[in-house]
Amino acid sequence: MDKTLEKEITGLLNTDVEKGFRLLMQHCGKALYWHIRRIVVCHDDAEDALQETSIKIFRSLETYRGDGKLISWVYRIATNEALHVLRKKAGLLRSLDSLSQSLSGSLAEESSLDEGSVEVVFQKALLTLPTQQRIVFNMRYYDDLSYEEIAQATGKSVGTLKVNYHYAYQKVKDYLKENL
C-alpha cells in the first residue's frame, strides 16, 4: 500500500470509520486472503480466517493509534487469525509445525494443478518450512513487504526475520533441486 493511500485511509478513519474500512478492505482484501491462504492452505479455512480478520479490524479501527504502518497492523491481525485456525486444526498435536503433512494433503485436494507441476512442488516446499519461516518467506516473496513491515506485523526483530528468510530460502531451493 503506498503512502498516499495509507494516509487517505487513516484520514478517513478519523472521520468515517466505515468508509475507511471499506476502502482498506477494497485495497487489501485480496492480498489478505492470499496471505492467510498461504498459511492455512485450505480455501474454506482462509475464508473463515479472513472473515474473522475483517471483523477484528473493523472493531479495532477506532483504537488504531497510527504508531506503525496500517498495512503492518492489518497483516498482524491476519497472521494471528491464520495461526489461530492452524492451532485449532493442530488440536492434540504438539506444535503447528506438526501440521505440515496434513496441510500438504489439503494442498493436493485444493489444487487443480498437476501433482508434479512447478507451482504444486513449490507450495509443498513451503509446507516443509517451520511455520514462522513460512510466514516470513510468504510476506517477503508474495506480499513484497519490507523486513521492517514484517517486524511490525509479527513482533519479531528485523535480524531474526532476515535469518528466518535466509534459512527458508535455502530450504526451498534445496527442496526444489531434489523434487523438480
Image: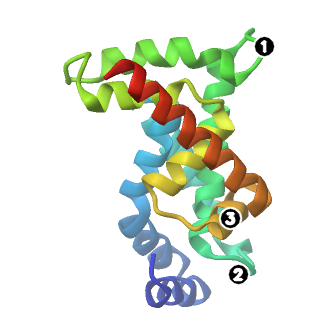
Of the numbered discs 1 and 2, the one sitting upstream in the chain is 2
Q: Nearer the viewer, mark 2 or mark 3?
A: 2
Left or right: 9, with 129 as reference point:
left
Colouring scheme applied when the structure was drawn: rainbow
Find out whether the residues at labels 3 and 1 contact each other: C-beta distance under 8 Å. no
Give the image location of residue 41, x and y in percent. 45, 29
Give the image location of residue 157, x and y in percent. 80, 60
**Within-10-Å neighbours for mark 3: few <14, some 14–19, many 20+:** few
Of the numbered discs 2 and 3, the one sitting upstream in the chain is 3
Give the image location of residue 15, x and y in percent. 56, 89
Of the numbered discs 3 and 1, the one sitting upstream in the chain is 3
Instruction: Find disc 2 in the rendering and name its residue.
Output: 66
Residue 84 disc label? none
- Asked which secondary structure carries label 1, the reply is loop
Find out whether the residues at labels 2 and 3 contact each other: C-beta distance under 8 Å. no
Residue 94 disc label? 1
Left or right: 136, with 122 as reference point:
right
Instruction: Find disc 3 in the rendering and name its residue.
Output: 60
What's the distance in space between the residues labelled 1 and 2, CA to CA?
A: 37 Å
Residue in view at x 67 percent, y 22 percent: 97
What's the distance in space between the residues labelled 2 and 3, CA to CA?
A: 12 Å
**Within-10-Å neighbours for mark 1: few <14, some 14–19, many 20+:** few
Which sits in the foreground, 92 or 107?
107
